[in-house]
Each structure stands twice: as C-alpha cells, then as structure tokens.
Image: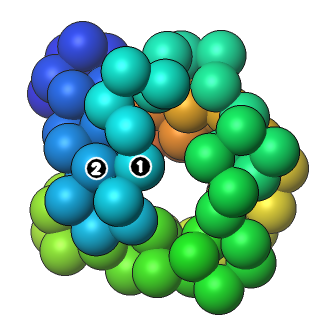
Amino acid sequence: MTNEEIQKTITDVLVADFECDREKITLDTNLFTELDLDSIDAVDLVVRLQQVTKKKVNPEDFRQIRTLRDVVAAVSKLVNE
C-alpha cells in the first residue's frame, strides 16, 4: 500500500466508524484535540486497522501517535515489513 492509499483508508475509517468530518482531516490533524478521539477510540482504531491490514498491530507502536501523519507512518511500516 502507498502512503496515499493508507491515508485514504484511515480517513475512510475515521469518517465511517468515528463520525469525523472528512473536511477536517488532513495529515497534520491531531486525532485527540481536533477530532475528539479518546483512548478507547484509539484502541478501536487499532483494532479496525488490524482488520484492514490483516496484520497484528503492536500497541506500543501506537502509543506516541497524535496526528494522521503518525498513523500513516506506523501503518506504512507495518504493511511494508
């Protein structure tokens, strides 16, 4: 998957599963302060990403994630390993 494909997939998940406004989502969007996700939402996002990528996500890789750019980088690393 390319970073653009990953970004689109994550954006689609945020819109569909977390009712986020697509217009507010950019690479620099902070998931917690701008999209109002909380720690439970973050866990749900990781579970959803595991379903999409068919890969086991290490929760430690997602501890420092704050922006969509961070998520794209982590997923890219995961799918391209």
Horizontal side, residue 53 vs residue 22: left or right: left
What colour scheme was applied to this rendering of the protein?
A: rainbow
Q: Which residue is mark 1?
A: 20
In the visual, does 24 lie left or right of 14?
right
67 up-or-down from 24: above or below: below
- Quadrant in the picture for the C terminus: top left
Return the residue nearer the eye: 19 or 47.
19
Mark 1 Cα within 10 Å, few/some/many (few <14, many 20+)? some
Which residue is farthest bottom?
40
Cα distance in 3D space between marks 1 and 2: 5 Å
Residue 45, image x, y percentages = 45, 68
Where residue 53 appears, as percent x and y from the top left, is: 19, 58
Residue 65 to residue 55: above or below? above
Q: At which x and y percent is residue 55?
A: 27, 67
Q: In the image, what residue occupies the spot 46% across and 81% down?
A: 44
Q: Residue at x 53, y 16 (%)?
A: 27
Quadrant of res 33: top right
Name the residue beneath numbered marker 2.
15
Element assignment for label 1 = loop
What amino acid is labelled 2 in the image?
Answer: Val
- Name the kind of residue labelled 1 in the image: Cys
Q: Residue at x 62, y 47 (%)?
A: 35
